[in-house]
Image: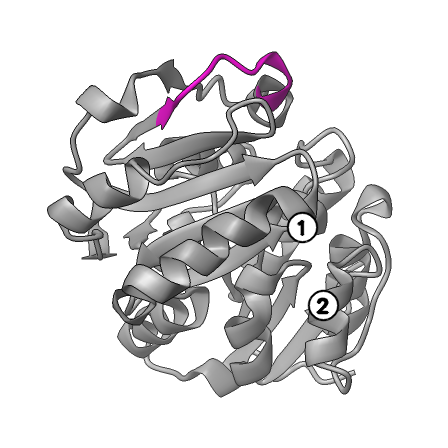
């Protein structure tokens, strides 16, 4: 396999993390060995920075590049912020006022290092057991739009999200980047945001391009990244819409089996 990649880039949930939404020991060992070979490691996720820093700190790395909130923020592991793109405050507040059925959909925001939600949902905490990063319940009608990296709606079914997506596209679609991190999670960011754009900026700072990167993902929020890198691999468990949109990209194994780590080992000759 091609060993000329200067960096690997991976999404987290449904990709690098296992079925318990944790980073497995096989993956931790693989990434540590990869870093020792001098290959850069990027994480590109919809999660917020405090959450991601906890996950990556389990790996023996001197440095890593963290693309969070789908590319609304990018940081070096050492702490330096490379870029931030917030939704304009007034527009962010407007998004928080969109009508929806609260028995079918919940509203969330990532603002700065904080996570806000409209209702207490215990099962969401399973995604963040490892990091302890958790939400604050708030009344969005009395909230604010400051430092909004993303607004996201989680539905019980994909159909629950369609009227919300349609409304946003009709009223302010030209000012926003709208995507899905999973079939039940509609995500809205500043119009210049996507994982690929943030990755391109970070790669440039490291002295290379997207073509030097090997990437892994499973959601529609990975589509630009997987299309623009040197090689973009899709998880077996990926959103079917992603597989349809990128029919020529290689499909690898399941995140439950730590397939990204296995693929990295085969590509870079790690044993």
Drawn side of residue 112 relative to residue 156, left or right: left
Q: What residue is shown with label 2?
A: 241
Q: Residue at x 76, y 76 (%)?
A: 244
Name the N-terminal-most of marks 1 and 2.
Answer: 1
Quadrant in the rendering for residue 264: bottom right
- For mark 2, give the secondary structure: helix
Start-end of magenta stretch = 116-124
Image quadrant containing the N terminus = bottom right
**Residue, x 40% and y 66% (percent of image)?**
194
Q: Is residue 178 magenta?
A: no
Expressed as whole percent of the image width and height from the top left, the position of residue 6 reads 52, 76
Residue drawn at x 41%, y 55% is 167
> Is residue 81 placed above or below 26 in the rendered structure?
below
The reply to whether residue 29 is in sight is yes
Which image quarter holds the C terminus? bottom right
- The reply to whether residue 65 is in sight is no
The CA span between labels 1 and 2 is 9 Å
Residue 72: x and y in percent read 31, 55
């Amino acid at each position: 396999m091609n060993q000329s990649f200067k960096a690997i880039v991976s999404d987290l949930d449904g990709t690098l993390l296992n079925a318990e939404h944790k980073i497995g020991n096989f993956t931790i060992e693989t990434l540590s060995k990869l870093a020792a070979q001098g290959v850069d490691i990027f994480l590109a996720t919809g999660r917020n920075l405090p959450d991601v820093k906890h996950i990556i700190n389990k790996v023996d790395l001197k440095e890593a590049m963290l693309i969070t909130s789908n590319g609304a923020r990018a940081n070096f592991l050492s702490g330096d912020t490379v870029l931030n793109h917030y939704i304009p405050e007034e527009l962010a507040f407007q998004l928080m006022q969109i009508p929806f059925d609260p028995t079918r959909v919940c509203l969330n925001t990532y603002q700065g290092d904080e996570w806000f939600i409209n209702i207490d949902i215990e099962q969401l905490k399973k995604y963040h057991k490892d990091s302890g990063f958790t939400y604050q319940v708030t009344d969005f009608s009395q909230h604010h739009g400051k430092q909004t990296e993303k607004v996201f709606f989680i539905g019980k079914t994909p159909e629950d999200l369609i009227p919300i997506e349609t409304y946003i596209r009709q009223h302010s679609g030209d000012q926003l980047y709208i995507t899905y991190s999973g079939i039940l999670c509609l995500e809205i960011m500043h119009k210049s945001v996507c994982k690929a754009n943030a990755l391109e900026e970070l790669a440039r700072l490291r002295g290379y391009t997207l073509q030097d990167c090997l990437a892994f993902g499973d959601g529609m929020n990975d589509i630009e990244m997987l299309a623009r890198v040197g090689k973009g691999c899709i998880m077996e468990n990926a959103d079917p819409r992603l597989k349809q949109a990128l029919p020529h990209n290689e499909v690898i194994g399941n995140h439950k089996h730590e397939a990204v780590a296995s693929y990295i080992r085969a590509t870079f000759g790690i044993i």
